[in-house]
Every structure is written in C-alpha cells, then in structure tokens.
Image (cartoon, rainbow, N blue to C red):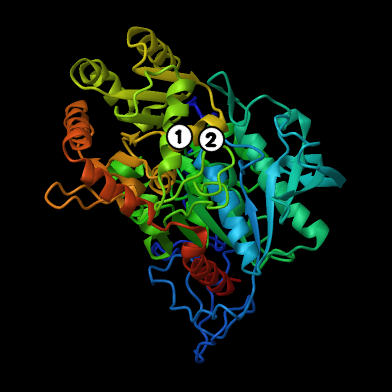
Amino acid sequence: MKAGKKTKSKKGVTKKYLNPSPCLLTPIQATPQKKSPKKSIPTPLKKEKQKPAKSVVTRKKTNSQKISPRSQNPTPEVHLVSKNDQKLSILMVASECTPFAKSGGLADAVAGLSKALHESGHQVRIALPLYSLIDRARWQIEFKHAVCVHMGKGEEIWIGLYLGLLDGKVPVWFIDYERFFSRPGIYDHQNQEYSDNPYRFALLCKAAMQICKDTGFIPDVIHTHDWPGALIAPFLKTWDRIFSPLSHTASVLTIHNIGYQGKYHAGVWDFLGMGPEHFHADSFEDFGQVNLLKGGIYFADAITTVSPTHAREILEPIGGQGLAPSVARRSQDFVGILNGVDSEHWNPETDSLIPASFSADDLRGKLTCKIALQKEFGLELRPDIPVFGIVSRFVHQKGLMLLQEILPTVLDQMVAQFVFLGNGDPTMESWVEQMKHRYPGKVGGFIGFNNKLAHLIEAGSDFFLMPSLYEPCGLNQIYSLKYGTLPLVRATGGLDDTVIAYNEADGSGTGFKFHEPISRALLHTLGLVVATWYDRPHHIAQMRSAAMTQHFTWEDVLPEYLKVYHQAIHRRSLWV
C-alpha cells in the first residue's frame, strides 16, 4: 500500500510538544515532570491493593494496580477464557477487503480473519470505504442512513452508511463520501498517489467509530490494519477517551507492511483534531511530518505483524524502516502471527477457476492445468519443461530487479519457461513485454491483474518465484504449497516461516530458498531448481507431496488473535 510523499512541513509546527498526554499508552519510562503553578497537570493514577486475577477478562475496571502512562513494566499476565466461554464483538477497520476492493494481501487477510472469527461465534463487523470501483449491484449493497462525522477544527462531514455482507456471512459497513472515495483507485491512479489520502482515511476511521455509536454496536476491540486504519487507536484515546460509549473499547493495530507508513505534511494535523500536545517525537511527529502509522503504534493497546520472523526483522534498523525504536518501545505488546489463507477460495480440489481439480493423491488435474497455462500464455506445449510462475505487484519490495538482471542468462543456458502476471512500475511492465518478444514460447505475461489467471498460474506452474527484498508474510507461497507448486523464495519474513528449504541429500523440504538479496544468489538457486527437475524428479514428487499437506488456515491462528484481543482488553481496562 502507498505511503505519503515527502513534502515540506507546515511552518510553526515544531518538536516542542514533548510532554505526553496522560491518556497515552506506551511502555516507555519518562522522567517525572515538575508541577507548574500556571498549568494544571492531571494527577498520576493511584495504586490500589491487588486482588486475585479473574479467569475472564472484561472491560470493567479491575482492582489490580494501575499502570503508569509511561511505565516500562510488561503487560500483566492475562488469564484467557476458554474456547467455549466469552464471545467478543470486534470491528475491523481497513482500506481493503476481498472481494470488494483489493490491491494486495491485506484484503485477503481482513476477509479471512473476519470470517474465521464469525464462524467461531464472535460478533464481527467490517468498516470499508465505498469506492466507486465496488459493484453495488453485484454485492447487493444497500443504503441505510446518513451519519454525521465530526473532524478537527469543528468540521462536520455527512457520509452515507451502506450495508452489505462478506460471503453472505459478515456484515460490512460501506462508508460513502464521493469527494474522497469516488475514484478509480484505492490509494492512487496511474501510479500517482492521491494527495488527500490522509484526509480520506482519517475520515474512514472517525466514521467507523461514529457508526458504532449510532448503531449501538459497541465493540470490545477495534482491529485496525496498516496506516489507513492506524488513527483508530489515537482517536479512541483522545476524542473518545471519556464520556463515550467507546471509552472502554480496546484497539489492536496490525502492521501488514511497515514500508508504507502514511507520512504527510504537518498541515493535516488540524483535520485530525487531537491537539498539539499529541504531536511530538514519540508519537506522530517524524522530522516535521505527520506519520500516521507511528502514531498508531504509540497509542494502540496491542500491536501485531503478520509473521514471527518479520516481527524480529521490524525490531532491527533496516527492517523497521525508521520505526524500529517506536516498535521496540512497545515490544511487550508486540507479536508476530502468521497469516492464514482462505481455503474456501484457494483449494485445488474445489477451485472452480481452474480447468481441472486435483489433490496430493491424484495429480492428473495439475498436468491439465499446466497445458492450459502454456496455451493461455503462448508457451511451447511441453509438459516436460519446468514452468516458473510470478504473480506480483511490480514494486521495489518484490525484488523482481534481481530476476531482471539474470533472466536472459537463465533462458539462454537453461530449458525453462516463465509466466508473469502483475503491474506497477512502468519500467518493469515494459521489460516483461520485451522478454515476451525476445523469447517467444519461453516467456508469457499479462500486465494487470486477473483473478482467474492468478489461479491458473498457481495451479499450472511447477514452481512459484518470490525473490522479495522483504516480505512481511506473503500469501502466494502458501497458495503455491497447497497447489503443489514449489515456491522459490528469498528467506525473509513470512517466506522463511512457511517454506522448508530443499535438502538435496534426502529430498526433504517444501521449496527452495536463497538468502542474499543479490541476483547471483537467485541465479544459483534457479540452477539448483532446474537441475533437480531434470536430474532428481523423484525429489520433486516427494517435495510436492509434502508441500500439499502443509496446513495454514485462519482457524489455526485464531487462538493467537483471541489471546491478543484479550490482552488488549485487559490493558485497556487498566486505563482511566
């Protein structure tokens, strides 16, 4: 997803607001401030005698010791409810959700987790902008009523609330405001970011909270996603801190891609309406700009990212991309949980978008899919040649420049075929077209995104290539495992967590890995893959069988998310 462009900050906004508000939630230990006769400072939270912890976390105030707003003490141990006990009410706030609006894996994650929670008996709602690209008739989206949303500087914005259902199960609140959302893209158009993105998604967050109050759906947890939803956490701790139905609602922020942070000029601050005391270097301020993700990290009751390895990478200077210190200060409330996949839509045994179904026990359908793939992309019809599939956004993160440097060498020296599906960087799009014309029958490609072609590539390819420079989780490699399409990945983030490297000695593993983000490492690994295909086909069959038995579902990770929700609720209950 897109981050804001760097622009000059507004004059008059400086780093002088360094004193934290008493409502902030962060584990940093601050130096006690001196009392000023001219300024009233809230008194610290009083300590009370501790009582034995209850077995169920509720949103009522407990008698346990209050946590200082700047305490370094870790989050108290939470005694979680059993699976058959308390059910939660949860609101998802996101900029994308499959199948309504999608630009990447975020949309699949929001949809998959929401459905898993719903099927487990929890009350779930999703708040999503009603983009003009969403087909209202197809998804039976109907108008409910108007909602008045209050933003900073006393601005009132009337939005339309529309209702729909995700897969006929989960209620979706579609937020309609044509000035902001009636556009051809989600974040940009023709690779040009919308300059008013911070205003658009600030309205999304504030509108979602207002709809809760207007409809009476008061969630235990609001789960927000990436920088477009990050303002939920600070809004809860400022606008709705007291005397609000949402005063006890906890916030959970999931970082799907820390490379996109929502950094904008300081002039947007007035629209957020949170006061200058919250614009300081520990929260929103980022070299004179407003960093929305940074502010969300500072205020959220709990923070997650989408794989355990990426959680460790974020805490390092390179992996954190400028926010490592901010996340490290919240390390007691930060955890990595691997994404699941939607087995309802990604299953070779039931997939209606592929020419033939197949399973680990009967792979005849996979050969049918391979022939169909070669025909579709104008490749030589040779089932004995390995096909490498790529479905990706053409952006720097995906590491396709590594392949760009070596693909001619691979095609000149090895017998293999490559299929591309994606769009983004115009230079990369042009390069794919050049490769198609330079190597007819060996390279095929489609510029853009097509869901049916994506399924065909997953089903018909022999190998799936993901040379990402960094990959928080990744979903395509998990789909590939399910379809017996062995992933070739760089060992980073969720790619490293989900793919077991090939062992040439015994044929074990579920895919191939390389470590250094350099083209030479990718070239050597491609050579190993092609050699294994031709020289050790029994190893390919063994790995394919092992890959298809891997299990990555939302039901598997649901207990981990429920634990985070209860911890967030518990932590929120300690704040006044």
Mark identifier at residue 355: 2
Residue at x 77% of width, y 30% of height: 178
User: Nearest the camera: 422 or 366?
Assistant: 366
User: Nearest the camera: 199 or 475?
Assistant: 475
Mark identifier at residue 368: 1
Rendered-image quadrant of the C terminus? bottom right
* Contact (Cβ within 8 Å) of mark 2 with mark 1: yes
Which secondary structure, mark 2?
A: loop
Residue 314 visible in this rendered orientation of the protein = no
Residue at x 18% of width, y 40% of height: 536
Residue 33 horizontal/vertical position (percent): 45, 63
* C-alpha separation, residue under disc 2 versus residue under disc 1: 7 Å
Is residue 516 positioned above or below 108 on the image? above
Residue 472 horizontal/vertical position (percent): 39, 45
Total numbered circles:
2
Is residue 15 positioned above or below 195 on the image? below
Residue 203 horizontal/vertical position (percent): 69, 41
Q: Is residue 263 left or right of residue 464?
A: right
Identify the residue at the far left of this view: 505
